[in-house]
Image (tube, rainbow, N blue to C red):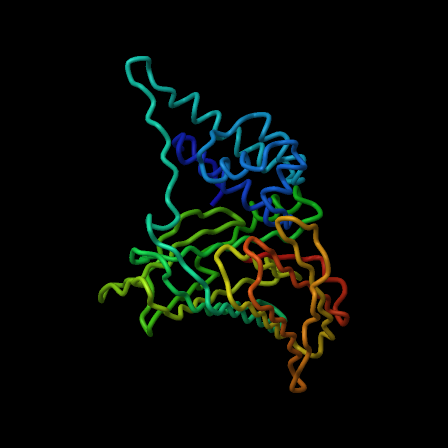
Amino acid sequence: MEAHNEEITVEQAAKDFAAEIMRWREVRGLSKRALAQLMGFDPSYVSHMESGRTKPGEEFARLADDALNTGKAIWRRWRDYEQARTRNRPTPATPPTPHRPEQSYATGSALLVEHDAAHLTYDGRSYRLTMRRLLRNIGTEPVTRYLVRISVDRYPGDPEQSNTHYRAHPLTWEELSLTATCRGEAMRREVKHDRDAFKEVWLLFDNEHGRFPLYPGESVWIEYAYTVADDKWGNWFQRAVRLPTEHLEVQLSFPAALDPVVWGTETSMTAEAAPLRTAPVQSGDGELRRFTWITATPALHARYRLEWRFRARPERDRDQKEFR
C-alpha cells in the first residue's frame, strides 16, 4: 500500500519511483519515446529510469509529473527517495553499494506469447477478468516465473481526485481474489509491488507440491483471474504488448439491460492514439451483450484500449481502468 514508511531504504524508494513513472506513463497510453519527447529528454533516459539504471532526479520528477498530469504523485515518490537517500547516506568510510536493477527474467530466457485471450465480464457491481496465455520459451534457459501487472485509475482526467480516492479506498489483494493455474496446478505468487492503485506480482511455476518450469522449446497455457469492484475499475480496459505476441483477443461481456456501446484506440511507439483498425464484433444471447476484438501479430509495445459507455446508466460512466 502507499502508506508512508519512514524506514524505507534508498533502493526501495528508487524502485517505487520507477514503478510510479511506469504506472502513470501507461495509464496515459504513452510509450517511453513519447514521454521522453514531451519532457525534452533522450528516449533512452526514460527507459533507464524505469529499469533502475538511472537514479531519480529532481528535474526529471518535476517534468514527468507535469507531462503525465499525476497530481504530484510522481513528485511525492521523488521526495520519498530524497528523504531515504539523505537518511541513509553512508559515512565516508563506507562506500555506497552500486545499484543492481532487478532482472525481469533470467539471463538467456525469452518468452513468446503464441495466444493471448482476455475475457472481461461485468455483472452490474464488479468486473471479473480472466486471462489465458499460451507461452513458449524461445530462449536457452528455463523460465520459472511470469510477471503480472494491475493498475487502476478511476479518474484519469483528475489525478488528484484519483490519488485521494485510492488513498482512502486502496485496492487490496483480498478483494482481487487472484487465482492462477498452469498445467492444472495452482501457481504460487510473489508480490513485487503493492501500492494503493498499482500491483505487480510474479506468478511462479511452482507450488507446495513441486516445480514445473517452462523449459526451452516448450509451450504451456497459464490462466489467471481477479475481481475488482466497479467503484475502483471503470469504463476502459487497456492491453500493453510487452512480449512478442502472435495473436491477441479481447472479449467484453456486459448486461444487455445497460445498453452498452464500445469503441477503441491503438497507440504504438511511433504513432499517437488512433481508432482501432477493425471494430469490435458484437454478439449476444438476450441477457448479455458481447464485444470481441482480435488482432494478429500486434506490434511490440503497442497499446490497445477498449472503452465503453452504458447508455442506460450514464451517471456512472466516469470510471476508468487499465490492465497490462
Q: Position of residue 83 (x, y in %)?
A: 47, 25
The x and y percentages for residue 261 are 73, 71
261 or 314: which is nearer to us?
Answer: 261
46, above or below 289, in the image: above
Q: Is residue 248 above or below residue 164?
A: below
**Residue 157: percent from the left, percent from the top?**
71, 48
Residue furthest top in the image: 92
Q: Residue at x 50, y 42 (%)?
A: 19
Q: Residue at x 66, y 63 (%)?
A: 306
Q: Which of these two is toward me, 257 or 169?
A: 257
The quarter of the picture where residue 109 lies is bottom left
| Residue 155 position within the rendered picture, expressed as x and y whole percent measured from the top left | 67, 51
Q: Is residue 271 left or right of 15 when viewed as pictured?
A: right
Horizontally, is 172 left or right of 260 in the view? left
The residue lying furthest to the bottom in this view is 285
| Relative height, residue 7 to residue 142 (above, below) | above
How many marks overall? 0
Q: Say which residue appears at 40% left-offset and 68% top-offset.
A: 222
